[in-house]
Image (cartoon, grey):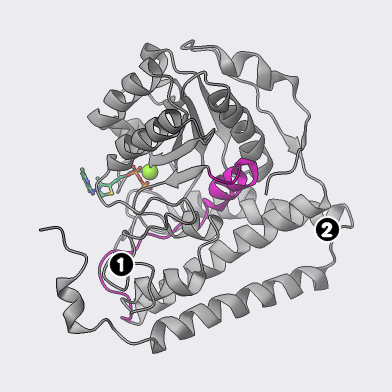
């Protein structure tokens, strides 16, 4: 799991922790060693290839219902994964496949859930947006925008009550950040000093509306200001920046100082869901992000520059990752559908 990295910017301890102030933090970049770069590369690539395959299966009509891909945002969840400790929980919305893979859930179980099969994580009855694993500390997978923020606050409450030293990470989008329950949660979390890192994945758009058109204030890291919750903006396309900021936020929570907000500035390459014509942004904008800021390409370039991996080494990793994803896709197409009797199980009456 997390290995200590050197943080090259001294700023992480100063402005970013300024409670409730509008001061901007300087970015902190954690230098990665070779193993960390390779780990980040492999983990992000697994998410990318998994999502590409999910997109294909959706196109083939094998996945029903909604399907929201995480392509472009991989550094956010992988950076946080690299900073967290065993026992820390994650909870997120419907764009959840990457979070599950980062929490070490079996790609076969995730893919089979997408195709509604018996071996799916929710026995094929939950689909893309509704998967959980208490064992791996992953609490969903939620379709109601913002709902996971209050539930994540509840996880933080449980951690404090049980004095288990764990921190809950509640992920939500820029669109969700305008939901009322987010602020009720902020109030309670700060009042009771709950160990929760609120992670705003600001991918610039809600379903089809840009942050600037939907939000009265656009620095989402400062949304906790009136509750005295510190916040920090992070380059969410750089896995090193994400890890450094996450370590700081998690430590803050673990020290009993209450919640922390991280606004990850990121971008999704695909549509909001599979049925999005994406008329609200230009192709050039997407292309620019892909070519100039891609989180995986950044790691790849560093690995090559430093001589830590050759083209062949990276190809071998890709091959390995593709094989894992192909195996998951095969399972997701051959595993049987749930028996009709399953209609009557796992139901709250
Ligand atoms: C309470 C609620 N309102 C509206 C919706 C419909 N809806 C689904 S996703 C979404 C946009 C959310 O955008 P954001 O929070 O930025 O997340 P992103 O999809 O960009 O990851 C909306 C309005 C919903 N699912 N739940
Ligand atoms: Mg968004």
Above or below: residue 63 compared with residue 16:
below
The residue drawn where x is 47% and y is 50% is 137
First in residue order: circle 1 vs circle 2: 1
The kind of secondary structure the magenta stretch mainly shows is loop
Q: Residue 10 in the image: state x and y as whole percent.
A: 75, 20
Residue 343 covered by magenta stretch: no
Above or below: residue 162 compared with residue 187:
below
Ligand 2 position by quadrant: top left
91 vs 41, nearest the viewer: 91
Give, as a single range, the part of the protein colored magenta: 61-87
Q: How crowded is mark 2: few (under 14 residues within 10 Å), some or many (20 or more)?
A: some
Give the total number of marks visible in the rendering: 2
Q: Residue 278 in the image: state x and y as whole percent.
A: 34, 56
The disc label shown at residue 304, or none: 2
Does the residue tagged 1 have its C-beta within 8 Å of any atom of ligand 1?
no
The residue drawn where x is 46% and y is 24% is 259
Q: Secondary structure under badge 2?
A: helix
Give the Cα distance between marks 1 and 2.
38 Å
Determine if residue 339 is in view: yes
Read off the residue under disc 1. Answer: 127
Is residue 126 toward the left or the right of residue 28 in the image? left
The residue drawn where x is 89% and y is 57% is 307
């Amino acid at each position: 799991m997390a290995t200590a990295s050197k943080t090259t910017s001294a700023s992480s301890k100063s402005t970013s922790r300024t409670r409730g102030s509008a001061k901007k933090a300087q970015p902190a970049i954690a230098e990665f060693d070779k193993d960390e770069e390779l780990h980040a590369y492999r983990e992000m690539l697994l998410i990318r290839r998994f999502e590409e395959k999910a997109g294909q299966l959706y196109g083939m009509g094998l996945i029903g219902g909604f399907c929201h891909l995480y392509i472009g945002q991989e550094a956010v969840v992988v950076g946080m994964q690299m900073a967290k400790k065993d026992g820390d929980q994650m909870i997120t919305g419907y764009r959840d496949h990457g979070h599950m893979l980062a929490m070490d859930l079996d790609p076969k179980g995730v893919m089979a859930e997408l195709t509604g099969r018996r071996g799916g994580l929710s026995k094929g009855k939950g689909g893309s947006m509704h998967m959980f694993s208490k064992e791996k500390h992953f609490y969903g997978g939620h379709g109601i925008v913002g709902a996971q923020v209050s539930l994540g606050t509840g996880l933080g409450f449980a951690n404090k009550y049980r004095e288990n030293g764990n921190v809950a990470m509640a992920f939500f989008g820029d669109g969700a950040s305008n939901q009322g329950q987010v602020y009720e949660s902020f109030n309670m979390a700060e009042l009771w000093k709950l160990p929760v890192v609120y992670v705003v994945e600001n991918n610039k758009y809600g379903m089809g509306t840009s942050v600037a058109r939907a939000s009265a204030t656009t620095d989402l890291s400062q949304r906790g200001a009136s509750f005295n919750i510190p916040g920090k903006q992070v380059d969410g396309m750089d896995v090193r920046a994400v890890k450094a900021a996450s370590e700081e936020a998690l430590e803050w929570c673990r020290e009993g100082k209450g919640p922390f907000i991280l606004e990850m500035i990121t971008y999704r390459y695909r549509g909001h869901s599979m049925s999005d014509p994406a008329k609200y942004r230009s192709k050039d904008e997407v292309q620019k992000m892909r070519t100039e800021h891609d989180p995986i390409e950044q790691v790849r370039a560093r690995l090559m520059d430093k001589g830590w991996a050759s083209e062949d080494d990276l190809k071998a990793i890709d091959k390995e990752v593709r094989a894992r994803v192909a195996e998951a896709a095969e399972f997701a197409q051959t595993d049987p559908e749930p028996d009709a009797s399953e209609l009557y199980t796992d139901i709250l009456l």
